[in-house]
């Protein structure tokens, strides 16, 4: 049962990610209340009251902890959403010259976010010494109910003890295991390599029939979410009691996973994966995650198209488009990410197109009204 009220603004391994979630969660509510004509104080009070009600009920919900920090963030979120509507004319319906500058600022902000999230997704390894653990029972993780028979790092056998510094690098982590009676219902580690503070340096796990690889990244130190890399349905043909061998390593073009005689390489992150630092739904299918990636890029460039449509023929519009395109092309190589895939290009271009269409349509409607 819940341990009682928390008076921290944010806490836990993903504290910053959860704080951002709460700051975003009530923005639609604030916008809707402002759109319906609610005055600021009343709208904000409704958001605060709703958030307090949710947190108060969590006192009796197993696995949930009521938090005053959530109430504060949700109240601020309501105010942000309402402020966007109450002050819409100041930032949305601006003169052409200012629209051009806002389009350029939006493109620069998008490129900065892509670069920053890419830096957070890059692997970093805390200083040794390291040790390995087989089928660990971590908090908020599943525990693998099969059996690990052996593990090695390169040519160095692992035996759930200290790992020589010379063994760790680009050498593959090789694991031989027996499948459990039923596939695990949540991510369950086979072998984890930890540092002296039990930070997860490298981890190979099974989630249902997915093969999962997780490595330490900068995002973890800043308490963002920790998205993993997955080979979907890799273990579909592995029956209960079967013995299988897994290898995991980083290649020249991304991470690689090997299952018996099958291999999947090129696993990695793209600039569209930046939203996963805030919220990572492991249960989403591959196509759903790709769709959200496209919407993430489209959302960042929506303003470029909208304010570009309002700016007319201002030269800054071409600079805005250039920043967006250069960001999509170069940020992946600078940040060590995979090249921007076609679906994310479609999302980015679609976002700018929708924004431009909205601006032009409004201009035409205004001219027609006159």
Image: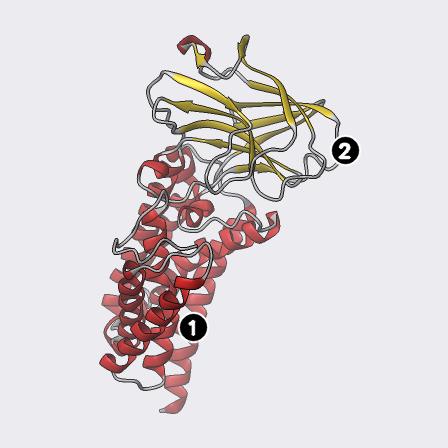
Of residue 73 and residue 160, the one placed in the foreground of this image is 160
* Label 1 residue SS: helix
> Does 240 appear above or below 302?
above
Query: Residue under circle 1?
Result: 358
Classify the position of the C terminus by image quarter: bottom left
Structural crowding at the residue carrying mark 1, measured as other residues with C-alpha within 10 Å and reported as few (<14), some (14–19) or many (≥20): some
The answer to whether residue 309 is visible is no
Q: Residue 300's quadrant in the figure?
A: bottom left
Q: Nearer the viewer, mark 1 or mark 2?
A: 2
- The residue sitting at 43% across, 77% down in the picture is 361
Instruction: Kindly give the residue lying farthest to the bottom in the view shown.
Output: 370
Mark 1 vs 2, N-terminal side: 2
> Does 70 appear above or below 266?
below
Classify the position of the N terminus by image quarter: bottom left
Give how far across and how far down residue 228 sits, in percent: 50, 38
Query: Residue under circle 2?
Result: 239
The answer to whether residue 214 is visible is yes
> Does 215 appear above or below 317?
above
Give how far across and how far down residue 198 sits, in percent: 38, 27
Give how far across and how far down residue 350 sits, in percent: 50, 60
Of residue 219 and residue 72, the one placed in the foreground of this image is 72
Give how far across and how far down residue 145 sits, in percent: 63, 33
Q: Residue 367's quadrant in the figure?
A: bottom left
* Label 2 residue SS: loop
Of residue 106 and residue 217, the one placed in the foreground of this image is 217
Distance, label 1 to label 2, CA atoms, is 53 Å
- The residue sitting at 45% across, 57% down in the picture is 298
- The residue sitting at 30% across, 40% down in the picture is 222
- The residue sitting at 46% across, 11% down in the picture is 167
Of residue 119 and residue 30, the one placed in the foreground of this image is 30
Q: Residue 119's quadrant in the figure?
A: top left
User: Is 314 situated left or right of 362 in this image?
Assistant: left
């Amino acid at each position: 049962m819940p341990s009682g009220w928390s008076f921290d603004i944010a806490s836990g391994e993903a504290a910053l990610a959860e704080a951002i979630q709460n700051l975003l969660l009530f923005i639609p509510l604030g916008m809707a209340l402002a759109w319906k004509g609610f005055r600021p104080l009343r709208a904000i009070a409704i958001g605060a009251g709703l958030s307090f009600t949710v947190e108060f009920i969590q006192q009796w919900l197993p696995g949930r902890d009521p938090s005053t920090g959530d109430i504060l963030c949700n109240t601020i979120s309501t105010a942000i959403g309402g402020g966007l509507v109450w002050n819409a004319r100041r930032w949305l319906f601006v003169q052409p010259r200012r629209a051009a500058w806002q389009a350029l600022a939006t493109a620069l902000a998008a490129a900065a976010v892509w670069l920053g999230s890419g830096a957070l997704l890059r692997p970093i390894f805390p200083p040794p010494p390291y040790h390995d653990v087989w089928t660990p029972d971590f908090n908020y993780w599943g525990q693998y109910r099969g059996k690990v028979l052996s593990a090695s790092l390169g040519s160095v056998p692992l035996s759930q003890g200290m790992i020589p510094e010379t063994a760790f690098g680009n050498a593959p982590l090789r694991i031989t295991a027996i499948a459990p009676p039923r596939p695990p219902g949540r991510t369950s580690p086979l072998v984890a390599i930890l540092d002296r503070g039990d930070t997860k340096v490298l981890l190979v796990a099974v989630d249902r029939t997915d093969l999962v690889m997780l490595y330490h990244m900068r995002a973890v130190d800043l308490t963002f979410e920790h998205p993993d890399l997955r080979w979907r349905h890799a273990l579909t043909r592995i029956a209960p009691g079967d013995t299988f061998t897994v290898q995991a390593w980083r290649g020249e073009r991304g991470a690689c996973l090997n299952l018996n005689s099958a291999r999947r390489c090129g696993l990695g992150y793209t600039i569209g994966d930046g939203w996963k630092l805030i919220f990572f739904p492991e249960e989403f299918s591959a196509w759903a995650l790709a769709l959200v990636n496209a919407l993430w890029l489209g959302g960042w460039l929506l303003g470029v198209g909208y304010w570009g449509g309002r700016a007319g023929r201002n030269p800054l519009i071409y600079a805005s488009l250039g920043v967006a395109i250069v960001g999509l092309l170069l940020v992946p190589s600078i940040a060590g990410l995979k090249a921007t895939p076609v679906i994310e290009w479609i999302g980015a271009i679609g976002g700018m197109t929708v924004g431009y269409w909205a601006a032009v349509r409004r201009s035409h409607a205004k001219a027609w009204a006159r």
